[in-house]
Image (cartoon, helix red, strand yellow):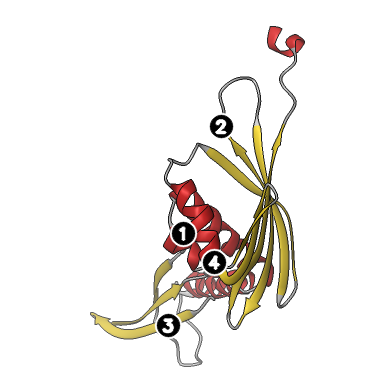
Amino acid sequence: MAFLSIAHGRETHGDQRHTHLCFLNTPDYRLSPNLVRQFRWTLSLPKLGAAGFPVAGGFMRWVAFLSFLVLSCAFGARAETPANEVRSVITAFEDGMADRNVAHLQKVVAGDVVAIRNGIRSDGWEDFRDHRLIPEFAQAAPASRWEIVKLNASADLAWAYAKTRVATKGRTETFLWTVFVLERRGKEWKIVLIDQNPGRAAPTSTKTRAR
């Protein structure tokens, strides 16, 4: 959710009187929970003339002020789309997996989640936590990088699948494919289905290695 708060005040410097406006714009379109972007800007506006227009030298400051307002509204609109909200939840899930943070994952996973990996099913958050996450988190997370391959979101339902590349020794590359289904529960999106299956790319050919 994005919001714009404005605080203003006046001060006098000699015979010049200025109005100071301070903007705080925090669009939460999350790339991750620890990446909340904050924009602060203080603009000193000159004294207005008798007709309500800025006096000489102040026109460009007003142009900058109006440009900032337009950009703030654009960022806010982007932050509130279902697709960006869902992307933020998936990012939070992947961050929680990488950080081995069970409490962080609980915030984005539904209590009635169904999690499937290699044909083994976990019913509900407690089953997923106790028989999947805690044993897996006993070991350090391998180096990896992930990306969302496809995401489709409506007002209350969304699905996406992601590809995670896991660093391994040798000539092969290991991948993990994850399918997510999310539902809007009240004001928040929750992950209700996680289906993960490993995949492996073909070994590097002898001809390619010779190069």
Q: In front of the other: label 1 or label 2?
A: 2
Label drawn at residue 6: 3
Between the residue at mark 2 and the residue at mark 4, the CA separation in whole angstroms equals: 28 Å
Task: Establish if 7 lies above or below 114.
Answer: below
Which of the 4 image quadrants contains residue 10? bottom left
Between the residue at mark 1 and the residue at mark 3, the CA separation in whole angstroms equals: 23 Å
Between the residue at mark 1 and the residue at mark 2, the CA separation in whole angstroms equals: 25 Å
Q: Which of marks 1 and 4 is nearer the N terminus?
A: 1
> Which residue is label 4 attached to?
125
The residue that appears at 61% across and 45% down in the rendered structure is 146
Residue type of the residue flagged with mark 1 = Leu
Between the residue at mark 3 and the residue at mark 2, the CA separation in whole angstroms equals: 47 Å
Q: In front of the other: label 4 or label 3?
A: 4
User: In this view of the protein, which residue sits in the foreground, 76 or 127?
Assistant: 127
At numbered mark 3, what does the secondary structure look like: helix, strand or loop? strand
Tell me if mark 1 has few (under 14), some (14-19) or many (20+) residues whose alpha carbon lies within 10 angstroms of its own: few
Q: Which of marks 2 and 4 is nearer the N terminus?
A: 4
At numbered mark 1, what does the secondary structure look like: helix, strand or loop? loop
Label drawn at residue 35: 1
Q: Earlier in the sequence, mark 1 or mark 3?
A: 3
> Which residue is label 2 attached to?
167
**Residue 164 at x, y = what percent?**
63, 43
The residue that appears at 58% across and 71% down in the rendered structure is 110
Q: In front of the other: label 1 or label 3?
A: 1
Between the residue at mark 1 and the residue at mark 4, the CA separation in whole angstroms equals: 26 Å
User: In this view of the protein, which residue sits in the foreground, 106 or 26?
Assistant: 106
Q: In front of the other: label 1 or label 4?
A: 4
Residue type of the residue flagged with mark 3 = Ile
Between the residue at mark 4 and the residue at mark 3, the CA separation in whole angstroms equals: 42 Å
